Image (cartoon, rainbow, N blue to C red):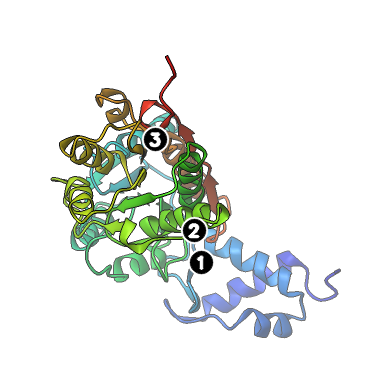
Amino acid sequence: MADHGFRYVEVKEKLIEEIGSMKPHDRLPSRTVLAETYKAARTTVERAISELIGEGYLYARDGSGTYVSEKRDGPKRNGPVSVGLIIPDIMHDTYPGILRGVEDVTHRHDISLVVCNTDNQADKQSNYIQKLLEAGINGIIIVPAIAGAVDPAPFYKLQELNTPIVFCNRGIDGIEAPKVVSNNFYGAYVAVKHLIEQGCRSIAYISRPMYSTSYERYQGYTSALAEARIPVREDYVMFEPTFETERQGYDSVDAMLRNGLRPDGIFCFNDGIALGAYEALTHHRLQVGKDVKLVGYDNTSLCERMPVKLSSVKFMTYQTGSHAAELMVRMLAGDPVRNDKLIVLQPELVVRDSSVMPQLQ
């Protein structure tokens, strides 16, 4: 619909004037109120506010409103530019791929990269954000920690200072920022559907403790079963009690078998859990690929090293990192990127010996 009030540029100029009379962290009136004040279409106001957020005049909090930034001179572009990458564990098989994707893009744009490991601890995450801010970091790409209560204050500080944030894999409730994620629901769905196509009817799900990613994969698991009219058996669903990697998968499958449960297919949250499941199955003298079919997730180097090569869902780690870094480059250049920008990458199933019907001789 045509805007019969102020044009977009005029609305933006009026907003800058109003911001100039406000204090840092003052809340801006609602979009509806501003549209009425300036006699402009709401979409015109939305566009002006979006650009002012990108230019550093304003910052937004999810569900709370839009506020005046501490810095109102737009993002700095003089001198060296550096970006922080905060990840749970550089030794974990999925994170080197994300790191490489980020590093390739930042290097191409002459941006220095600082890498921080949180060990999935929320308090360590907060400490790193504070240290990066003190060091004058220009932006942060982060895979949020999943252990411990997340303190939103460091993220609010980033927004107040107009320091760009890009989330990878998952976001944080209450913090609006662009995200690059994998379709965990779909990855689990295709894995379980494959097991069903291979004749499995009693399929277990062995997972890390309950959090957003493990729950999304659980939903994909249950959806594939429901589509095939296979009831979900809660005694075939095991969430590991901790995030520790020692004996992951082994104890859950061992306990299941000792309790008289006999799945003919197992879908695992990741390849590390699948390795533990494999060891438990062989301990109970069950042949993987024949007696029990097994699928992991992440398509790590473990898949080819296991005695029976592991079928696994391929997580697009490199693409996750490169897309996140490209978003960061755009934000540092002053391009308006919406806080609700979401890039969803589709995983793929890589089929190997652990889940296919044995060949007839």
Q: Which is nearer the eye, 252 or 136?
A: 252
For disc 1, the marked residue is 57
Residue drawn at the location 28% of the way across and 57% of the way down? 238
For disc 2, the marked residue is 74
Residue drawn at the location 78% of the way across and 73% of the way down? 6
Distance, label 3 to label 2, CA atoms, is 45 Å
Q: Which is nearer the eye, 91 or 260?
A: 260
Mark drawn on residue 312: 3
Say above or below: 254 vs 10. above
Q: Secondary structure at mark 2?
A: loop
Question: Residue 57, image x and y in percent?
Answer: 51, 66
Please report whichever mark, 2 or 1, sits nearer to the chain's N-terminal start: 1
Label 1 crowd (10 A; few <14 / some 14-19 / many >=20): many
Question: Decide: marks 3, 2 in contact (CB < 8 A)?
Answer: no
**Amino acid on which disc 3 is placed:** Ser
Distance, label 1 to label 3, CA atoms, is 46 Å
Q: Secondary structure at mark 3?
A: strand
Question: Decide: marks 2, 1 in contact (CB < 8 A)?
Answer: yes
